[in-house]
Image (cartoon, helix red, strand yellow):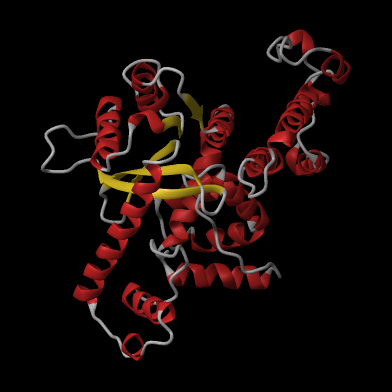
Amino acid sequence: MVCFICGHNLPFTIVDHVVNLCKAMFPDSDIAQAMCMKKTKCTELTKVLGMCMTNDLASRLRENKVSLIIDESTDISTMKCLTIVVKFFHKDMKTFKTGTLQLINMYDENDEMVGSTGENLFRLIMNTLQSYNIPLENFVGFAADGAANIMGGNNSISSSFREEFPGIAIFKCICHSVHLCASEAVKYLPRHCEDLVRNIYTHFAHSAKRKHELKLAQTFLDLKPHKILHPCATRWLSLHAAVERVVEQWSALKLYFSKIEAQQRLKSIEFIVQNLRDPSVFLYLNFLNFILPKFSRLNLMFQQDAPTIHLLHEHIIQLCKTLLRYFCCSDVVDKVDLVAFDPSLAVNHMPLHHIYLGSEVHGLLQMDEYT
């Protein structure tokens, strides 16, 4: 859990954290040091502190140019929210600062117009800016992911912004675009490869007994007792971490599921065992384990604390050339302009037995079991 007041991880309950925070703010006050509170008082206190911080943020936005960043999220109670984050120049600190302006329930029962349509989201954003009396002429930039209701050509937030604020700078999240590229490419591989990774995680996710039995198999095979990771559909390239863990624990998983196959006659376990015994599935997963980190490293370039804009162009060019050399003739890739190069043309492709799929895959293909 993260405190929305100070931004630190909470090792205790929210009540304990707020009390400790107040004591730290006033170390010379006997009253503050003796302070204690329970849930109701703490809730009201956090609301007041939150309103004070939001009002202070809004007052700064009235005096500075501001860019908006939005995202949709669903909390543990399944309430879908629209998060509005602002970025502006802090004159006192002489640096750019980012802050959360508002968290809006997109399905408010008191609101006649609900949902995640572009029209409704645009209305919620404009209402938020107007409620804090932020001059619309201060609004200069907008960034979000590439969902159709946000970045689509018609009836989206971005199209509404272009009509309302001509000349506004609109940026689609590049990390999200890279994730979509990798996701679309993975779809050309057999579906059961990704399903296997997800089904293995689901089998162990909520059972301490199953995790313990897998740990015994890992210990028997002298493998590190690592947990099976979740390939989350909404997390950028999380599939790689999950695939890497399954490949690492392949022998332990085969031993575990072979042992319980006769005991638990379930379709899900039959599916897992069948794919664990399929040599082609192991080859596909090793290929994913080889290729997906290249996209992950590109995403990390956009998430650095220090400026990397001067490095990105060269990094992307080198990544494109590296990927093309795996299946296209290298002499063609090195000589031609990448903008004019068409990687889908068969004339540019290498023979199938020359395509590079990673050292692990090529090593496995030398074994009789995988030929």
Which residue is more in the foreground, 261 or 233? 233
Using residue 344 as the reference point, say whether residue 78 is left or right of it. left
| Residue at (79, 41) in percent of width and height | 368
Residue drawn at point x = 25 percent, y = 64 percent:
48
Return the x and y of residue 352 as percentages of the image width and height.
Answer: 78, 21
Q: Position of residue 163 (x, y in %)?
A: 35, 16
- In the image, residue 172 sits, relative to residue 222, either above or below, namely above
Name the residue at 38% across, 51% down.
57
Q: Is residue 201 above or below residue 333?
A: below
Identify which residue is drawn at 82% across, 43% down. Answer: 363
Is 320 located above or below residue 31 in the figure? above
Q: In terms of image quadrants, where is residue 14?
A: bottom left
Q: Quadrant of residue 223?
A: bottom right
Residue 56 vertical placement versus 296 (above, below): below
Q: Left or right: 192 with respect to 218? A: left
Q: Position of residue 348 (x, y in %)?
A: 78, 12
Q: Quadrant of the C terminus?
A: top right
Q: How many marks?
A: 0
Residue 333 position in % (x across, y down): 82, 18
Asked whether 252 or 135 is in front, the reply is 135
Q: Quadrant of the N terminus?
A: bottom left
Q: Is residue 44 left or right of residue 245?
A: left
- Image side of residue 31 versus residue 85, left or right: left
Front-most of 143 and 218? Answer: 143
- Taking depth in this image into account, of 304 and 78 the one nearest to the observer is 304
